[in-house]
Image (spheres, rainbow, N blue to C red):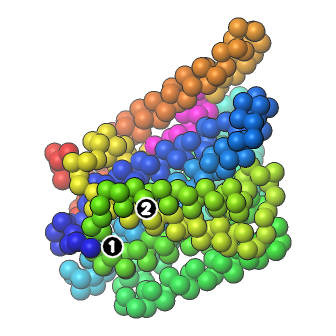
Amino acid sequence: MGASRSSAGRYYRPELDVVRFIAFFLVFLVHTLPSTRDPRVAYLLGRFGPAFDAAGDACGFGLNLFFALSAFLICELLLRERESAGTVSVKQFYIRRILRIWPLYYLGLSLGLLVAFLPGGDSGEVMVGMRWFAVFMGAWYCALYGALHSPADVLWSVSVEEQFYLFAPWIVKYLNRKSLYGFCLAVILVANLLLFHLGRVRASHTGVWSNTFVQFECFAGGILLCLVLRGRLPRLAAWQRLALLGLSLSCWFYSCYGLHAFFGSAGGRNPGSWPLIFGWALVALGCVLLMVAFLGVRTALMPGWAIYLGRISYGLYVFHEFAITLTHRLVIEPVASLNNPVVNSLKGPIYLLNLGLTLGLTFLMAALSYRYFETPFLKMKKCHAVIESQPIAGAS
């Protein structure tokens, strides 16, 4: 391990912005990749179909990567604040989180309501769900009643983050490092006991996936990584980092392909208690290994565009389902309604074109949001920072 290059009053790692972008892109893929439920895709892939579906499901763990990364950074910043100031200012922590999370979150909910009242929207169901989402209980709504039929449905995960924030500053303020280890192990134990129960009762996919306590296992993994590193950076050769990255992705893939822990596209069948327990352990392990693979990589080796896109990844995440909905209505539905043999023969190229259009629209929406909507709140957030975690103005 090598010493961190960050000063005592600053902790900004550009390579973690790249990890954020990777996390978003994986989530984008899970929402846009075709599956073997389409007979044409099944015919094209043949016996490789199950592996393709498992790889697509594994992309969903980009969300868990967001959770683990968030826990790692929150714990790191709060520990540095405690070391620097002698304590943790819980009030300042919540002000910073509110300024960063709430404005874009409620903008996303407002856009979701707008879409619900457009032709083809389900305003009744969305209105009921939005009441839960408005008070950061979206995860529990999805766990109990299933996914919200709205582009704002992805915001259920933000409620998981908010529930993590309820205890994060308090445990760092009052627990020493040894007690923090014990806390993380207790969280993992609770998550696994719950997974055992959810496996026995054959809970639905959303009943497992959207359960806050299940997702907390990845938060615990991020905190444990922070505690183990103690502010240092891994000093690894390039081949070691590539090996860790490959192992990370292998953990996720086997969790889906071998254990069916995600079971979103496996006929919706819950695999049972032990596959869930071991599968989610691999998910958390994969998140930690991927972060280790990137931590300490020299900034010069990181593409500037990936750092920037990671910086605006919150907007990318919030807006990507809206972009998918918009391009589906403007491109896919009109093309499907043509029922033209020539057009039907070009559905593959049209899908790829639409995929690029959707991704580009997502980038545009997030960039505009970051520049004109989020930046004023980020400037206010900076005034409440104890340990600076934003890039230096003008730095690449």
Q: Tell me the quarter of the image containing the N terminus.
A: bottom left
Residue 142 in sight: no
Residue topped by disc 2: 244
Q: Tell me which numbered mark, 2 or 1, is placed earlier along the sequence.
A: 1
Residue 6 placement: quadrant? bottom left
Residue 172 in sight: yes
The boundaries of the magenta stretch are: 316-327
Q: Which residue is nearer to you in this view: 365 or 304?
A: 304
Q: Amino acid at mark 1?
A: Glu
Relative placement, left or right, of 242 versus 343 is: left
Residue 325 placement: quadrant? top right
- Dot 2 falls on a residue whose secondary structure is helix
Residue topped by disc 1: 76
Relative placement, left or right, of 264 versus 376 is: right
Is the stretch drawn in magenta largely helix, strand or loop? Answer: helix
Identify the residue at horizontal 70%, vertical 77% (top origin): 194
Q: Distance between the Cα atoms at labels 2 and 1?
A: 22 Å
Crowding at label 2, few (<14), some or many (≥20) Cα neighbours within 10 Å?
many
